[in-house]
Image: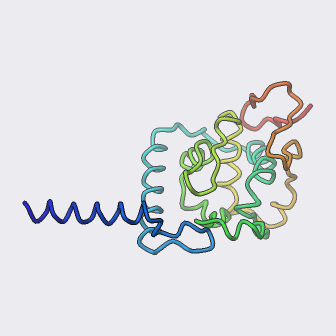
Amino acid sequence: MIGAATLLLVILAIIFIVIFTGGYNVAATDRHNPVVAWALTTTMTHSVQSRASEIPVPAKFTPAMVAAGAGEYKAMCSRCHGGVGESRAEWAETIRPKPPALVSAARQWKAQEVFWLVKHGVKMTGMPAFGPTHNDATIWNIAAFVKALPDMSAEQYASYKADHDHHHDGEEHHGHGTEDHHHTPGDDAHEH
């Protein structure tokens, strides 16, 4: 028992030394230590799975939902996650952890997990939470599009247009007189 307590104190002392001396390099130009990368990825995956497991999923993702989600995705997500036949922006290559290429990574996540990730974001990854600025219908449209990506051709992807009501200043300009997105899944949220 004393040995275990001593070992615990030594481990805590090492952790505090690393924390307070800046011993762990947090630069995005330096990849995570493999053990740290594994711990962070595993924690994130299990956290999302646990929190998303009870979210009810729409009965079916319609072509209208996919099309509506495409505009949002191309305006807000493609710079980091890329698209079918489209690489992520050059600057996104240096984000740590690197944003997943959703054309392939979307297969690893259930629809409600994609919804949760888009709505809540992920701490310390650069993945923002869109829930505070977008309603659930819009987020389901994005999830529908993301889940469709792995089976989409480059021509199909290119045929979808970005939602140009999203501007580079980070502010959304929808011309609705409100900050809330209120529409049903599949609606063109930006039709004026």
> Count of labels shown?
0
Question: Looking at the picture, does residue 89 appear above or below residue 181?
Answer: below
Determine whether, in the image, residue 171 is placed left or right of residue 38.
Answer: right
**In this picture, is 61 found above or below 93?**
above
94 left or right of 54? Answer: right
Q: Quadrant of the C terminus?
A: top right
Q: Is residue 133 above or below residue 75?
A: above
User: What scheme was used to colour the molecule?
Assistant: rainbow
**Residue occupying the point 8% across, 61% down:** 2
Can you name the residue that lies furthest to the front here?
21
Q: Which residue occupies the foreground of this view, 60 or 15?
A: 15
* Residue 148: image location, x then y, percent: 69, 56
Residue at 78% across / 47% down in the picture? 72
Depth check: give the residue in front, 139 or 38.
38
In this view, which residue lies farthest toward the left? 1
**Foreground pick, 75 / 96:** 96
Quarter location, residue 147: bottom right
Q: Is residue 109 left or right of residue 84?
A: left
Instruction: Report which quarter residue 20 is drawn in.
Output: bottom left
Q: Residue furthest top?
A: 177
At x 84%, y 65%, the residue is 155
Q: Quadrant of residue 184?
A: top right
Quadrant position of the N terminus in the picture: bottom left
Q: Position of residue 16 (x, y in %)?
A: 35, 60
